[in-house]
Image: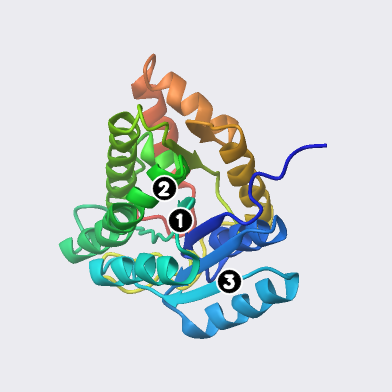
Amino acid sequence: MKRNIFRDKVIIVTGASSGIGRATALEFARQGSKVVIAARSAERLATLEKEITDIGTETLACVTDVSREEDCRKLVEKTIERFGTVHILINNAGISMRALFDDVDISVLKRLMDVNFWGTVYCTKYALPYIVGNRGSIVGVSSTAGFHGLPGRTGYSASKFAMHGFLETIRIENLKEKLHVMIIAPGFTTSEVRKHALLADGTEQGNSPREEKKMMSPEFVAHWILKGIRKKKRNKIMTWAGRFTALLQRIIPAVVDYGYYLEMKREPNSPLK
């Protein structure tokens, strides 16, 4: 019988109010973990908190805007006050964008970096001593956009590239401490991320340009997050297209560039001409 390594472990999940974050929090709860859920929506966190409590495990809901360092510090402090430690941090909170760099307001790119990159930095900074002490895991939920630039997503790709570099360095700096760091890159996943993606002027897109029903489910991604932690995976690219991207960009990068140009141009109302 497989040993349950997650029972009674303390897990922090950011961006837990919907999509991958929500599914991941519930999956850990089913494994008997003590789950700290963080997001900006108090109402959604309350709903998820009840679901986790009904499963029969302990939870703590913390209203958190990861782009604010003070919020991230308080998130970890409240976790320590309640549970005494942290074993695993899931850096999942993130936003996307859809606009050409020529057209986009610089404030949009700053917002992407604040949430996707700095949110990961802040949470990791304050949780790291506890996770290192437990020889635990830090996970960054990323995308193929973190391995190869995507047209119309300059801020998104830049923030994910930055997150990759940061987490890889944290891994190397803590080799002797046996810290596990995993970057997981799902494919397009059914979630609200495209609905809330920022346009050139910073307003939200409102509707997804893709068929959400044909995408990965958040539950499928959550399953692989836990599986990756069990197996101490380094990088997990969840689609064949993503794996080919990581390989072919070293061999025929111009072909990969053109392939992504055509892919993004096919989207309805694409900013690409």
113 up-or-down from 68: above or below: above
Residue at the disc numbered 3: 59
Q: Position of residue 208 (x, y in %)?
A: 52, 64
Q: Is residue 191 shown to the viewer in this render?
A: no
Residue at the disc numbered 2: 131
Name the residue nearer the viewer: 119 or 19: 119
* Neighbourhood count class around disc 2 (C-alpha, 10 Å): few under 14, some 14–19, many 20 upward: many
The residue type indicated by label 3 comes to Thr
Q: Is residue 31 left or right of residue 1?
A: left
Q: Which residue sits furthest top?
A: 251
Do residues under tags 1 and 3 come within 8 Å of each other at their CB atoms?
A: no
Among numbered discs 1 and 3, the one appearing first in the sequence: 3
Disc 2 to disc 3, how far (Cα)?
A: 18 Å
Q: In the rendered image, which quarter contains the N terminus?
A: top right
Q: Is residue 80 left or right of residue 184?
A: left
In the picture, residue 111 is in which quadrant?
Answer: bottom left
Among numbered discs 2 and 3, the one appearing first in the sequence: 3
Name the residue nearer the viewer: 170 or 241: 170
Disc 1 to disc 2, how far (Cα)?
A: 6 Å
* Neighbourhood count class around disc 1 (C-alpha, 10 Å): few under 14, some 14–19, many 20 upward: many
The residue type indicated by label 2 comes to Ile
Do residues under tags 1 and 2 come within 8 Å of each other at their CB atoms?
A: yes
Element type at marker 3?
strand
Q: Residue at x 41, y 55 (%)?
A: 270
In the picture, residue 65 is in which quadrant?
Answer: bottom left
Element type at marker 1?
loop
